Amino acid sequence: MCGGSTSVSYPGPTPAEQQLEQLQLQQLQQQSADMESFKPFVLQQYGLVSNPNYSQSKVDQFDNQINAWKTSSNPTGTGAPTDAQRQDAINQLEQAKADYLKQNPVYQYTPEQQARNQQLQQIQDQALRLQKAQGERQAQAIAGTLPLSAALVNQMGLDFQKLKTDQSNNGNEIIGDSLDNAVAKSTSGQQALEALRTTYGTLASNEQNAAINEAALPGVYGSQYTAATQPGAPNPSMFALNPQSYSSAYQPYIAQQQGQFQANATNASNNQSFYNTLLTGLLNGGSQAGGMAAAAMA
């Protein structure tokens, strides 16, 4: 006699669990609807609006074609392409998709924001020009070729003319039209020239050192540009629900299906054991009957 198999069943979700699962689904649906309703306000904050020329179906068409070339053995219906042909077609489709999105972005700036962006770009360009000029000044100062400031040159000329006048009144003639090439005909006059040269040499050196040690521009223009454009344009993905929200809602269903799978596997194993035992019993019984018949005939 052969025993029957043991059937294993996995209990389904309780009414309370089903109610919780339904509540999770409703919450996800409500979150999705709320985010869609909130989207215009977020876009407005960044000076953006949805682009009426953008077509999701067009983007999907590109994606479907790219996927077909990646997965199908015969994407065109005219025969299997070579690897090089396949990759070339994929590259062309991806470039076409990129060109389309560049010309037709999901969101576009309002006219007011476009004007503001242009103004901010001008501010940034001006900041870059100032930074470049500062770098050139520092390089000249290090090389010792930085021209003196106009104010220092003007003051040096005034002081030189005053020195010439004062020395002339004292009977000390100074020849020359600038401090650099002037020569005095007396010792006292030459000493006065050297003293003035030392003074302006120190002032000129101070200007050179100031340019060398000059810190980078405080970035007033760059800061204005950064502050005005922060935090930047929103990414379309910000309007999508967190995948974690979906995965948590899936957990009860996954557990239910895994439990049912284990129950089915256990039942299959039990059934197989039952039939193996039955088959073994039939084979053993058949051998014994054959032996008895042979003995009786003898």
Image (tube, rainbow, N blue to C red):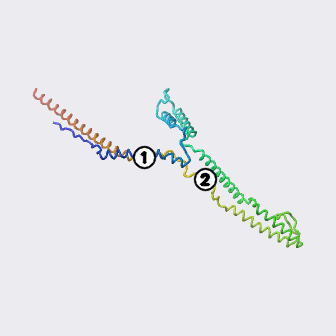
Identify the secondary structure beneath mark 2. helix
- Disc 2 target residue: 225
Q: Answer with mark 2 or mark 1, whichever residue precedes in sequence.
A: 1
- Disc 1 target residue: 31
Camera-nearest residue between 127 and 26:
26
Q: Residue at x 88, y 66 (%)?
A: 175
Q: Residues within 10 Å of mark 1 (few under 14, many from 20)?
A: some
Camera-nearest residue between 171 and 82:
171
Camera-nearest residue between 195 and 124:
124
Residue 297 image position (x, y, % from top left): 10, 26
Per the model, the C-alpha gap separating discs 2 and 1 is 35 Å
Give the mark toward the camera: 2 or 1. Answer: 1
Question: Residue extending furthest right?
Answer: 171
Identify the secondary structure beneath mark 1. helix
- Tags 2 and 1 touching, CB below 8 Å: no
Q: Residue at x 75, y 59 (%)?
A: 147
Q: Residues within 10 Å of mark 2 (few under 14, many from 20)?
A: many
Residue 181 is marked as: none
In this rendering, the count of numbered labels is 2
Identity, as a three-letter code, of the amino acid under mark 2: Tyr
| Left-right relation of 207 to 96 | right
Residue 165 image position (x, y, % from top left): 86, 69
Q: Quadrant of the N terminus?
A: top left
Q: Is residue 175 above or below residue 5?
A: below
On the image, which quarter does residue 298 sit in?
top left
| Left-right relation of 34 to 15 | right
| Left-right relation of 181 to 234 | right
Identity, as a three-letter code, of the amino acid under mark 1: Gln
Residue 107 image position (x, y, % from top left): 54, 43
Residue 37 image position (x, y, % from top left): 47, 45
Q: Is residue 185 above or below residue 27?
A: below
